[in-house]
Amino acid sequence: MRQIHGTLEVRTRGRGLHGFTREVAAWLTRHEADRGLLTVFIQHTSASLLVQENADPDVGADLDRFFSALVKDGDPSFAHDAEGPDDMPAHVRAALTQTSLSIPVVDGAMALGTWQGLYVFEHRLAAHTRRLALHYLGD
């Protein structure tokens, strides 16, 4: 059994879903991963990770509308606003979602369902570069 570590940067355009499935698939191919478990971890507190629908862009827009209604920018009950009115709401949204994903790898490919893809869920309004730590354990 072997372990492979790496990083991936995902540039976001602001709030919403930003896919990175192809980049991870290429990383697995480059390292000749066959069968094992891939862990992806986002090294930020105002963005998160999702496995989500990859065919209909309305899903991402609907998720954004849902979270915007659930956790409003500029909510006066939040004291932390060092980087603007979307600062603390971004942290709350990240706390409600995931910071890591575990994905089985079978025959060199992620065992994702037909309509599933990997996404950074950016919770800030401005564009950011998000750093992901990758760890593969397997054959």
Image: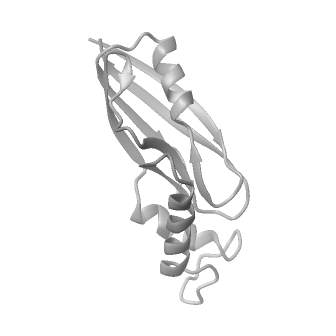
Q: Residue furthest bottom?
A: 76
Above/below status of 134 relative to 50? above
Q: Nearer the viewer, residue 62 or 83?
A: 62
**Residue 113 in the image: x percent, y percent?**
34, 38
| Residue at x-position 49% and y-position 73% | 66
The part of the image, by quadrant, that contains residue 124 is: bottom right
Callout count: 0
Q: How is the image coloured?
A: one colour
Name above or below for residue 90 compared with residue 127: below
48 and 23: which one is in front? 23
Q: Residue at x 63, y 40 (%)?
A: 10
Q: Residue at x 29, y 17 (%)?
A: 35
Query: Seen in the image, is 132 located left or right of residue 11?
Result: left
Location of the N terminus by quadrant is: top left
Q: Is residue 81 shown left or right of residue 94? A: right
Q: Position of residue 13 (x, y in %)?
A: 71, 52
The residue under the point 41% across, 60% down is 97
Q: Is residue 83 left or right of residue 20?
A: right
Q: Where does the C terminus fall, quadrant-wise?
A: top left
Q: Is residue 29 above or below residue 129?
A: above
Q: Nearer the viewer, residue 4 or 15?
A: 15
Q: Image quadrant of residue 104?
A: top left
